[in-house]
Image (tube, helix red, strand yellow):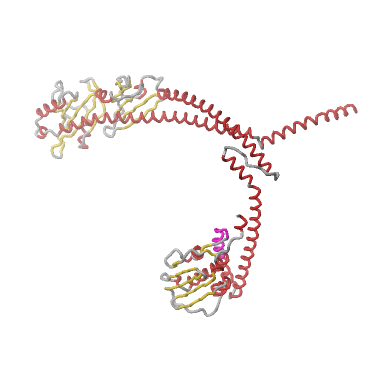
Amino acid sequence: MQDVIIHAETHGGAARPSEWSAGKRSGRLTRLWRRPPLLVHLVIFALTVLIPALLFSAFLILQFSQQQQEIAAAQVNDTAEIVSNAIDREIYGLLTAGRVLAASPTLRTDRLEQFNERSIAALVGTRTEAELVDPSMRVLVATRPDYPPPGTQFADTETIQRVIDTQRASISGVSFRDERGQFVYHVAVPVKVGDAIRYVLVLSKATTSFEAVIADRNLPREWSAIIQDANGKRVFAAVTSEGRMRARQSVSYDNPSIIETIGDTRMSADLIEASTVSNLTGWTTTVAVPSAVIDRPVTRSWLLLLGAGALLLAFSIALGITFGRRLADPILKLAEQAERIGKGKPATVIGTDIAEIGQVSKVLAQASRERREAEEQNHFLMREMSHRTKNQYALIAAIARRAAKESADTTEFLDTLSEALNSLARSAELLAGGNWESATLSDLLKSQLKAFGVETDQIVLAGEQVPLNPAAAQTIGLALHELATNAAKYGALSRPEGQVSISWSIDENLVLTWRESGGPPVTPPSRSGFGTLVTQKMTARGLGGNVDMDYAETGVVWTLTAPAEAVTPRPDPSADVSA
């Protein structure tokens, strides 16, 4: 048993060095992870250059692929509109011809034989037939020589009735005409005598005539188009061949589809198609192209862009290596310089052609001196802040004592103290914006009188820019607030027509005048309260000047005269420290 115990202790002692080595390696890896060396940063830098380039290349490929699809979709949509407009122009020309014939004087006088001769002459060579139908659907005139005798019922009664009901021209759908063995469509135009429709002139034309209309559309291979009337019947179908659209007659008459027009079911699995409806005829034109046709150039573009991406990758790697070598040496020297400065040793500026690193080196050389100057500046600011805080507390305490002494009850005391503190807060906020160095008299007036309408015509300011030191700003601010409060309660600001004019000037003395007019008649106060204390005694004593308060019947006139050196900012001692 003892041997076993000794063996276990010996084994445990042998394991400790390996555990210590593993822990040391783990600690080193942890430090490298937290503070990787420059080489790791350079590798990361190279990746940050390469990854955006690769992502941008992929983005370009995707954008190009999407752009090709969008271009194809836009081209299909434009082609549908072009084909539809071409059909509309053909029908509109036929409609114009019908209106010209319908305006013939021979129809007004019922000279139907002469009208027939004129119609034959007008339509010769157009492969268009004309028929004159009366409201009872009887055909009275037909330009075809083999047409049945007059009196035959017109087959498309729906179109004739629509013209009679609306008294407007109408375009029919497509129908099969046995005697011609063709699919035809009709353009029906009313013939009016007075306000009544006497006849309906019908111009008929075979749908095969549309082949000549759209044959000049220059389109790529395997594009197809189909035109359906308002009832879903096939008017015309075509597919491109050698850059031209050729008619395809094998498409169903009832409920035809664009897939039938393509003819190749392998190409019709995924189509890019667009449809447009004619406002003139109500016919729908659909144009489609198989996506596989568009994917061919896209595939070539993918290969081209992938090759360009590979070149960009190689270029980025070379660029990263080149600039990495240029950055590594001066950065290491910069680290050594920082280490010397941290140890309190002198460090010279690094010689490098990289402007930023050279600038950092110069900054490091000045770091210790600037730090001492900053500490001195902070000590000065703390002393100044302590001094100003004590002054602020002393001023608030004095105001509180005076308010308590002059107030009749607690409510009046609290109101008076609250108004005074609010005035001090506004002055303090204005001074804080200027680092407690100064505030202009005009800004002080606007801050203290904002609630009393300083931006209206009731308060008029006139004077030059006069900077005030913090003590003067707080003292004058209190007086201005008290004057404005009294004017709003009893003086010029209590009436819409009242006005307060504030003017000031400065040379050896600051002269600030508050003049009221247009208010109720003024009577001197029967007793001196806190307002009198603030506007006269505290202001005169605090600024080392004098205050003249004139309770004129036309309006109060308050004039402050104070030495310029008592109100303007003093030179800042900290300027010597930062120099």
Name the main secondary structure of what is drawn in magenta.
Answer: helix
| Residue 316 place in picture, x, y as percent | 54, 29
Above or below, 188 against 572 in this view is: above
Question: Which corner quadrant holds the C terminus?
Answer: bottom right
Residue lying at the far right of the rendered structure:
2
Q: Is residue 342 magenta?
A: no
Question: Which corner quadrant holds the N terminus?
Answer: top right
* Residue visible at 12% across and 28% down in the picture: 118
Residue range (magenta): 424-436
| Residue 48 place in picture, x, y as percent | 56, 33
Above or below, 262 against 378 in this view is: above
Q: Is residue 3 left or right of residue 363?
A: right
* Residue visible at 50% across and 27% down in the picture: 309
| Residue 550 place in picture, x, y as percent | 48, 77
Nearest the eye: 524 or 566: 566
Residue lying at the far bottom of the rendered structure:
526
Total marks placed: 0
* Residue visible at 54% across and 61% down in the picture: 430
Q: Is residue 427 magenta?
A: yes
The part of the image, by quadrant, that contains residue 396 is bottom right
* Residue visible at 38% across and 29% down in the picture: 73
Nearest the eye: 92 or 293: 293
Nearest the eye: 355 or 191: 355
